[in-house]
Image: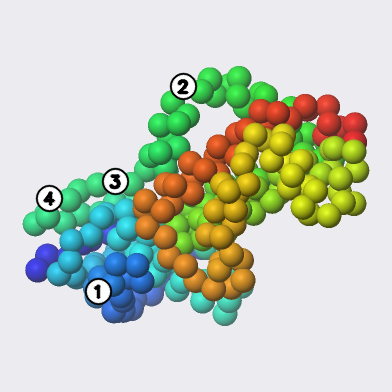
Amino acid sequence: MEPYFFQGVVLPERAQLSFEFNIRFVHSLSQKEADAKVSVDLNQVAVWVVTEDEWGIFDLRNVVKNIVQNHLAMIGFLKGYAYDLEITRVLNQSRNVDYVFGVEIPCLEERGKTIDLDKALADLRMKTVGKNGMYINRCFSDLVSAMKHADDTAFYCYRAIESLRHHCAAVHNNLASMDKGTQWTKFRDVSGSDESTIREIKESADPLRHGNVAAASSEDRETLFIKTWDVVDGYIKAINPSENINT
């Protein structure tokens, strides 16, 4: 049985790292089983996955990425090193698989196809200046983390929305001193979001926010991305840039 072969790189490459290990795993959502051999030689990553099951390459990529990232996290804990990881390609000739992974999330890439990037960036920069702009920047950073970390997508999506709730409270009539229920009501009003959508995102995030684990399928993540981007986009479009500076 030909294995799936994944290639990647540990970053930064100037901080050289080499290790090798074998692991057997069961995917928590699908209960599919597989054996993986992980080899990192001078930061170049090679992972062979032997399995009798058919896998979606994005789901299997996410599992492989988690396996290697978990090992890097242990190294980080023991040595104080902060590494990043990219999985760049998967091959399996017998299954006719040869795919180079990009940085895009397809449902979000499709959503942004018609955006004038220069104009949109200029508009966003105006909305992230001033003392309250830090909430908007935190939101964007968390959305990138949601894209990068598959199993923690819901956690970062909800925290991004929470940052915007704090922004909304800071710029509207001293809402920061009011209870959360009042703040959320105002946020939903400004962003044009309904309570059920935000509650669904929160419920997906709750296990992760409390230190539990909750794996998500590619379909689950796509739903989370679309709902979260709708909420964030509605709020960002409603922001008056002067509010960040004058309050």
The answer to the question of whether label 1 and label 2 lie on touching residues, with beta carbons closer than 8 A, is no
Q: Residues within 10 Å of mark 1 (few under 14, many from 20)?
A: some
Which disc number belongs to residue 114? 2
In the image, residue 119 sits, relative to residue 67, either above or below, namely above
Residue 65: horizontal and vertical position, in percent? 39, 62
The answer to the question of whether label 1 and label 3 lie on touching residues, with beta carbons closer than 8 A, is no
Residue type at the position of mark 3: Val
- Judged from the image, the secondary structure of the residue bearing numbered disc 2 is loop
Q: Nearer the viewer, mark 1 or mark 3?
A: 1
For marks 3 and 2, the one nearer the N-term is 3
Residue 63 shown left or right of residue 138 in the figure: left
The answer to the question of whether label 3 and label 2 lie on touching residues, with beta carbons closer than 8 A, is no
Q: Residue at x 25, y 70 (%)?
A: 32
Q: Nearer the viewer, mark 3 or mark 2?
A: 2
Q: Give the Cα distance between marks 1 and 2.
A: 41 Å
Q: Residue at x 38, y 39 (%)?
A: 106
For marks 1 and 2, the one nearer the N-term is 1
User: How many numbered marks are there?
Assistant: 4
For marks 4 and 2, the one nearer the N-term is 4
Q: Residues within 10 Å of mark 2 (few under 14, many from 20)?
A: few
The answer to the question of whether label 4 and label 2 lie on touching residues, with beta carbons closer than 8 A, is no
In the image, residue 233 sits, relative to residue 83, either above or below, namely above
